[in-house]
Image: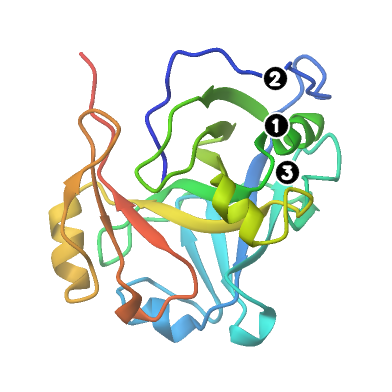
Amino acid sequence: MLQAMSSQQPAVADVSRRPAGAPSPTIDEIVLADEPQRWAALGFSVLGDRLQLDSVRLRLAGADAGRGIVGWSLRALSGGELDGLVTTASQSAPADPAPAHANGIAAIDHIVAMTPDLDRSVRALQGAGLNLRRIREQPTAAGAPRQAFFRLGEEILEVVQEPEQVVAEHGGADRPARLWGLALLAPDLDRTVAALSPHAGAVRDAVQSGRRIATIKRSAGLAVPVALMSAKPTTV
């Protein structure tokens, strides 16, 4: 999941098509091939096939919609091609922020995408107007060699380079990028983990200094990998 943002400079040029002063892209809706009752059983406030995390809407389209995260809609795009990420341009005004759910989860911390070619994906995302914050040139514990981070309003898009072995085993680097998982913000992480028991893993230190992380287990039956993040430490 999201790794600490280093001070290293991005390895690719800034090719954003977003005019100076234009609004930055933000997330309107994320569509999951998942069943609403699975999220409701975990203490989320689900209305029909939708729930809201801060100002971002999740649409739970059911297992027949595809697999995992099947797409999303973004506001203020400058281009339409995001290296294979299934994206719809949204003209909707941002939703009013929703209160935290009964399980204590308040927002999306970041959304994770996987790519076999990080530099290609970064160029495409910048070309669509997304704001590249930085590239981390350090491996993750899972073996991903590099990650890029884009700001989408309050949320972060983390784009992860697949390890070489994964790229080779799954058909090479010509494959498109794909949306993969979510990390959700739980300001009182211990309370949230207790509320999700027995479907939440143990709390441990996150890569980011001062933050902690846990994961929702496969026993919850969710269609996407979900991590839980504590709040960012306040600075004095």
Question: For residue 19, which numbered disc appears in the image?
Answer: none
Task: Give the residue type that dot 3 points to.
Answer: Arg
Point out the image quarter for the C terminus: top left
Q: For the image shown, how many numbered marks are present on the structure?
A: 3
Q: Nearer the viewer, residue 182 or 94?
A: 182
Q: Within 10 angstroms of label 3, few (less than 14), some, or many (20 or more) residues? A: many
Rendered position, 62 above or below 192: below
Give the number of the mark in front: 3 or 2. 2
> Which badge, 1 or 2, comes first in the chain's sequence?
2
Q: Nearer the viewer, residue 211 or 162?
A: 162
Q: Within 10 angstroms of label 2, few (less than 14), some, or many (20 or more) residues? A: some
Q: Position of residue 129 (x, y in %)?
A: 76, 30
Q: Nearer the viewer, residue 140 or 21?
A: 140
> Which badge, 3 or 1, comes first in the chain's sequence?
3
The answer to whether marks 3 and 2 mark residues whose Cβ atoms lie closer than 8 Å is no
Task: Give the Cα separation between the discs numbered 3 and 2.
Answer: 24 Å
Q: Circle 2 sits on which residue?
A: 12
Q: Circle 3 sits on which residue?
A: 75
Give the number of the mark in front: 3 or 1. 1
Q: Position of residue 111 (x, y in %)?
A: 52, 49
Residue drawn 23% across and 67% down?
A: 200
> Which badge, 3 or 2, comes first in the chain's sequence?
2
Residue drawn 48% across and 81% down?
A: 36
Tell me, yes or no, if residue 96 can be seen here. Answer: no
Q: Circle 1 sits on which residue?
A: 119
